[in-house]
Each structure stands twice: as structure tokens, then as C-alpha cells.
Image (cartoon, grey):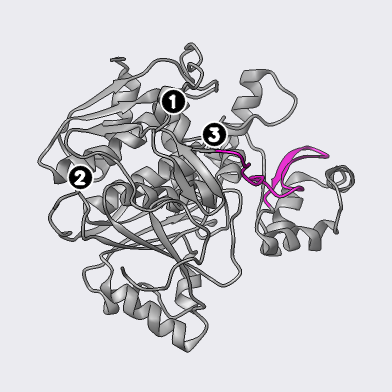
């Protein structure tokens, strides 16, 4: 067991922010991911918070979190056997030097890449794009890409973010915006058996949340529009879920979705607020369809302030909030140094899962979770994590859509409630849009 005051404080803060109290958590495992921040402790604390929510449903059993395995799950849990995962990033996504600093372009989604190209032109390689970006001021380029509907973030130091109108707004927000609590079905043979979860999420936080819920017995149905794919991450996060497609602009599919929503217990979504409103499934309509729905949602930059509803991702929030700049100074590097994992996304996923398990409708943001990490201060130097061994992998082979694979052992242990999944990861759209 590794006593760590900061680690315990993160868990207490997160659990109490959900209205939770009590609960016992033991942390095991030595070492840490190399970072300017205590990312390993951050990962373990997020997993522990979700674990406390499961334990609470079971009458308060002890939660044990393996810090090392939690760190590894914040990277990749899947180990392909005889095949390779597709690249995580679009070829031109990444950090670029402007005239006065650095900017990150997020172009994984085709429409986000087209938005960047409308500003910067189409480029076959990073080198030619870098030459164009070098002529811009970072703030003007960020504004231009965002105005086109794209995703970009200039690198700021923490001090600048703290003075930025959005940084100030986020600092004043609670970790969870909570609105009521519903009674989920009592725990049965598994903690979440019989609980239906409608998953409208994309990379990466929401899918992590629903993967966790599936690991404790929830029936998760993920809905994607026709043609949408996330080839670099779907094998990682589709575990335990049925994945279907619906076009919510067509009457027949809208009717199917309305029926699914009326029969769901939990909705997890990461659409920007106006997107669901435009589709006719805003907060009022959702409440009408299912009055006792547990509605958990995520945005990037917070729910108040001038950037509320702004498009964003983990890597962009790290640039905006000062995390990447702090990493650059810590490493004495010449370019941005982000966290070694997409910790904001993963932590958000486990915290969203915790809210859902407690039956609480909640709104969460990556920027507020970044504030939670920043508030812990710099990391205390610690030895590196031990190398992965065969014992770290589950014995079972997972027959995914892409080939056989192995998964890491779960990072969380609760007596009498093993984390396990009934369905292997499969490609988006493999299932019918119905409850099993």
C-alpha cells in the first residue's frame, strides 16, 4: 500500500463533489508516469471514485486500485495479437510553431480537417503546412480555425489561463454540475445488471465512461450516425457495447431513437448543447420522453463563460490551460510537452461513470478536470512504472472485429464484484438499434 496525501485528497474531493461520503479505498502499485504533474495519482483517483460508486451500490465494500494498472489503462488496455491498431492521429494533426509561439491543430474528424484547410489551404504533408503556420500569430490562427468550425488551441502558460475570461469562469465552476438524483434498479447478480445506458459519445471520455459501466453489467447501446468512425480508438473503447447507427435527421430513425431513449435509464452524451436541440432532442424533450432519465454530459471548455460550448478535445485543453507549457518548462524542451496520456479524457470518463452509477444527472468539462489536476501542483519525483509483464494481461483472448487481442487486467478490485465484459470490442454499426 502506498500512502499519498494528495492522492487521497483528490478522491475525497471528487467523491464529496458527487455527494458521496465514507468508503474505503486502498491503493497498491509503485512508480509513476513521467510528467510535470502527478498523472498516475490522478488516474488512480479517478478510477477510485468510480469504484466508490459501485461499492456504494453494494453496501460499502472496500475498493482496491492498482496505481500502475490505472496508469496503463489511461494509455491503452488492448494488446492486439498479430495485427496493429490504426494510427490515433490524422497525419496533419499536432503542434506547430507560429510567429509568436505554439498552436495545436486537431484534425482527426474530416470536417475539422476541412475547417483547418479552409484557413491554411490543403497540404499533403506536415512540412508544407508548418511553413504556412509559421507566418501566423497564434491567437489569430486559433480564432480563424475556430470561426470556420474547426478545432485549434494556442499554447498558454497557466498564469495566462488563470487570467483568461474562460479560465476564470472554469475556476468558479463546481467539478460536477448536478441536477437531481434518480433511483436506478437495485444491484442484482452484477452491480449494474438491468441498467440500460444509451451512449451518444465520441472520443474519448464518454466511451471510457460507458466501457466502465458495461464492465459492471450495464447494457450499453452506442449510437453513431451513418459513416462515422474512429478507427484509432474504437477497438479500445467499444468493449462490452452493442454499437448501432441511426440518422437522427430521418423520421424513421428519429422514432427509433425516441423509443430507445424512453426505455433507457442513463444517457451519456458529449454533443454540444445546441446540437441536440437542433435535432429535437434538447433537455426538455429528453425529460418529456423519460422523466427519470439520468442525463450525464460532457463538454470541453466549461459550461459558463465565453467559451461555453466551444469545440475542444483533451489535447487542446492541455494547450489552453497551461498543462503543455508547464510540461515544456519541466522537461526544458523547445516545444509543447503534454501529459504522457490523455488523462483529462480518461479521468472525465471515470467521473462521469461515477455520477451515472449514483443516479445523478451531471455536466462535466475537461477544462474543470484540468483545473483539478493543476490544483495538485507539481509531481513529486518517483521511480518509473515497472515494465509490462504477462501477469498484467487477462488470460482470456478477446475476439474483436479486427482480430484476437488481450486486455490488461482491470485496475479496480471490489470483493464479490469483478469487472468483466460480456461482449468483445466490435466495429461501429455492427448491431441493430434496439435493446437486447
Q: Main secondary structure of the magenta part?
A: loop
Which secondary structure, mark 2?
A: loop
Residue 131 position (above or below residue 374): below
Residue 161, image x and y in percent? 56, 39
Q: Residue at x 43, y 81 (%)?
A: 280
The tag earlier along the polypeptide, 3 or 2, is 2
Frontmost of labels 3 and 2 is 3
Which residue was labeled with disc 3?
341
Name above or below for residue 191 compared with residue 14: below
Tell me if mark 3 has few (under 14), some (14-19) or many (20+) residues whose alpha carbon lies within 10 angstroms of its own: many
Q: Which residues are magenta?
A: 81-106
| CA separation in Å, label 3 and label 1 | 10 Å
Residue labelled with disc 2: 19
Toward the viewer: 274 or 255? 255
Q: Look at the image and tell me whether residue 42 can be seen.
A: no
Q: Residue furthest left?
A: 59
How far apart are labels 3 and 2 at the CA level? 29 Å
Q: Residues within 10 Å of mark 2 (few under 14, many from 20)?
A: few
The circle on residue 40 is 1
- Check residue 313 in the rendering and tell me which mark sits there, or answer none: none
Q: Secondary structure at mark 3?
A: loop
Label 1 secondary element: helix
Amino acid at each position: 500500500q502506498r500512502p499519498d496525501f494528495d492522492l487521497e485528497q483528490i478522491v475525497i474531493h471528487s467523491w464529496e463533489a458527487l455527494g458521496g461520503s465514507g468508503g474505503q479505498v486502498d491503493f497498491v502499485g509503485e512508480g509513476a508516469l513521467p510528467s510535470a504533474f502527478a498523472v498516475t495519482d490522478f488516474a488512480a483517483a479517478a478510477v477510485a471514485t468510480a469504484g466508490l460508486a459501485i461499492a456504494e451500490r453494494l453496501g460499502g465494500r472496500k475498493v482496491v486500485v492498482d496505481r500502475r494498472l490505472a496508469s496503463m489503462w489511461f494509455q491503452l488496455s488492448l494488446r492486439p495479437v498479430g495485427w496493429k491498431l490504426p494510427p490515433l492521429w490524422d497525419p496533419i494533426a499536432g503542434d506547430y510553431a507560429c510567429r509568436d509561439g505554439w498552436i495545436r491543430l486537431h484534425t482527426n474528424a474530416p470536417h475539422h480537417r476541412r475547417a483547418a484547410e479552409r484557413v491554411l489551404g490543403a497540404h499533403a504533408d506536415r512540412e508544407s503546412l508548418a511553413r504556412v503556420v509559421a507566418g501566423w500569430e497564434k491567437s489569430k490562427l486559433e480564432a480563424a480555425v475556430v470561426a470556420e468550425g474547426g478545432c485549434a488551441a494556442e499554447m498558454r502558460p497557466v498564469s495566462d489561463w488563470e487570467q483568461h475570461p474562460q479560465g476564470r469562469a472554469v475556476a468558479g465552476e463546481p467539478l460536477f454540475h448536478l441536477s437531481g438524483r434518480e433511483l436506478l434498479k437495485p444491484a442484482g447478480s452484477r452491480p449494474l445488471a438491468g441498467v440500460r445506458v444509451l451512449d451518444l459519445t465520441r472520443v474519448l471520455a464518454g466511451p471510457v465512461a460507458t466501457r466502465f459501466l458495461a464492465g459492471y453489467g450495464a447494457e450499453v447501446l452506442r449510437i453513431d450516425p451513418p459513416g462515422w468512425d474512429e478507427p484509432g480508438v474504437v477497438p479500445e473503447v467499444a468493449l462490452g457495447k452493442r454499437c448501432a447507427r441511426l440518422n437522427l435527421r430521418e423520421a424513421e430513425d428519429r422514432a427509433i431513437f425516441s423509443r430507445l431513449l424512453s426505455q433507457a435509464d442513463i444517457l451519456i452524451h458529449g454533443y454540444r448543447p445546441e446540437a441536440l436541440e437542433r435535432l429535437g432532442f434538447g433537455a426538455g424533450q429528453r425529460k418529456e420522453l423519460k422523466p427519470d432519465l439520468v442525463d450525464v454530459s460532457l463538454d470541453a471548455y466549461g459550461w459558463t463563460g465565453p467559451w461555453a460550448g466551444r469545440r475542444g478535445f483533451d489535447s487542446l485543453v492541455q494547450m489552453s490551460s497551461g498543462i503543455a507549457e508547464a510540461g515544456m518548462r519541466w522537461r526544458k524542451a523547445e516545444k509543447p510537452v503534454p501529459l504522457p496520456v490523455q488523462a483529462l479524457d480518461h479521468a472525465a470518463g471515470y467521473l462521469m461513470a461515477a455520477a451515472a452509477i449514483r443516479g445523478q444527472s451531471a455536466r462535466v468539462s475537461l477544462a474543470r478536470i484540468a483545473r483539478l489536476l493543476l490544483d495538485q501542483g507539481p509531481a513529486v519525483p518517483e521511480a518509473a512504472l515497472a515494465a509490462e509483464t504477462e501477469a498484467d494481461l487477462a488470460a482470456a483472448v478477446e475476439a474483436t472485429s479486427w482480430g484476437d487481442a488481450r486486455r490488461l487486467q482491470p485496475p479496480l478490485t471490489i470483493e464479490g464484484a469483478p469487472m468483466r465484459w460480456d461482449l468483445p470490442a466490435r466495429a461501429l454499426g455492427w448491431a441493430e438499434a434496439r435493446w437486447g
